[in-house]
Image (spheres, grey):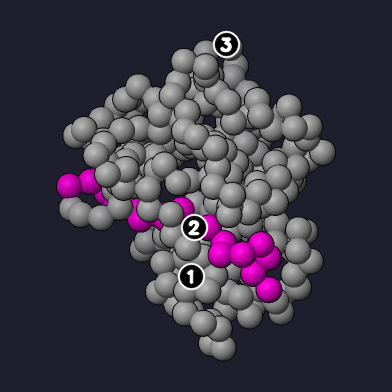
Amino acid sequence: MLSNAARFLMVSAAASLVALGSAPAEACQEIADEALDLAAAQTPLASGAALFTLIQKNVWGYSSSDLGVLWGSPSPSSAVYYDNAVDLIDVIGTAAGDDFTPITNIANIAAGDVLVIDATGTYSGHTAIVTGAPQQINALNPKIGTDTQWALPIVDSTTSVHGCSTIFADDRFTASAPGSCTGTFRGGVGTAFMRIYADATTGALTGHTWSVTSGGTFYAQSGTTYPVRSFVIARQQSCPLL
């Protein structure tokens, strides 16, 4: 189990960066705590969606039948979690929108929220657990208009490293030399950071990159100018839902 001090260090990357205020009280901190424990244990899981599913089973004792009632599947994919989060689907027998509340402003993201990227025709989607408040960074390439950029601390399960930043590191990556972007990567559950873009005036979420590394591919929420991989920051409406 991780100590409180260790958890704090994981989500406090650099003192020179601007950090947001304290997390809203209604966020499910239990989700972030369990995610960090699974990361510390280097739990082998096939996907980020499987990670969120396991967290629900571990924290609240959900069975596969319970998950089927909540999400319409005993083993939900990222696409299923996304559709629930944006209310494209609602499970029969439950009230509409009774599972997730979308968090649409960068200032309101908190530990215990769930980041879900929707699937596309060539991409299966992804799910990650937010473990702390986003931290504003000096803009890196690609720069998108006047959008602000934020480093978001997460836990996920993946076989693709979240970049090679030494400040916003993926703890599954071991560089071959200090500062090198070549090295070895351990797949499975671990801590990392993703980069979130937000409108400089309204704080609305506009896109993301997989890592906080200069030159990473920017994915927009919508439109035709940039490749699109829509994502949502979703908050459970109660802890637990059942």
Q: Camera-side residue: 115 or 30?
A: 30
Q: Position of residue 225 (x, y in %)?
A: 17, 47
Mark 3 or mark 2: name the one nearer the start of the chain: 3
Q: Position of residue 8 (x, y in %)?
A: 66, 29
Q: Camera-side residue: 104 or 39?
A: 104
Image quadrant holding the N terminus, namely: top right
Q: Are marks 1 and 2 in contact (CB under 8 Å)?
A: yes
How far is disc 3 from disc 2 in space, using C-alphas?
A: 36 Å
Mark 1 or mark 3: name the one nearer the start of the chain: 1
How far is disc 1 from disc 2 in space, using C-alphas?
A: 9 Å
Residue type at numbered disc 1: Asn
User: In this figure, which residue is indicated by the disc labeled 1?
Assistant: 84
How far is disc 1 from disc 3 in space, using C-alphas?
A: 42 Å
Residue visible at 34% across and 47% down in the picture = 205
Q: Secondary structure at mark 3?
A: loop
Queried whether the magenta region covers residue 229, the answer comes back as yes
Q: How many marks?
A: 3
Q: Are marks 3 and 2 in contact (CB under 8 Å)?
A: no
Whether residue 33 appears in this view of the structure is yes
Residue type at numbered disc 2: Ala
Residue type at numbered disc 3: Pro
User: In this figure, which residue is indicated by the disc labeled 2?
Assistant: 234
Label 1 crowd (10 A; few <14 / some 14-19 / many >=20): many
Q: Position of residue 208 (x, y in %)?
A: 37, 42
126 above or below 13?
Answer: below
Res 203 quadrant in image: top left
63 above or below 223?
Answer: below
Q: Camera-side residue: 164 or 239?
A: 239
SS majority, magenta: loop
101 left or right of 201? right
Q: Which stretch is magenta?
A: 225-242
139 left or right of 88? left
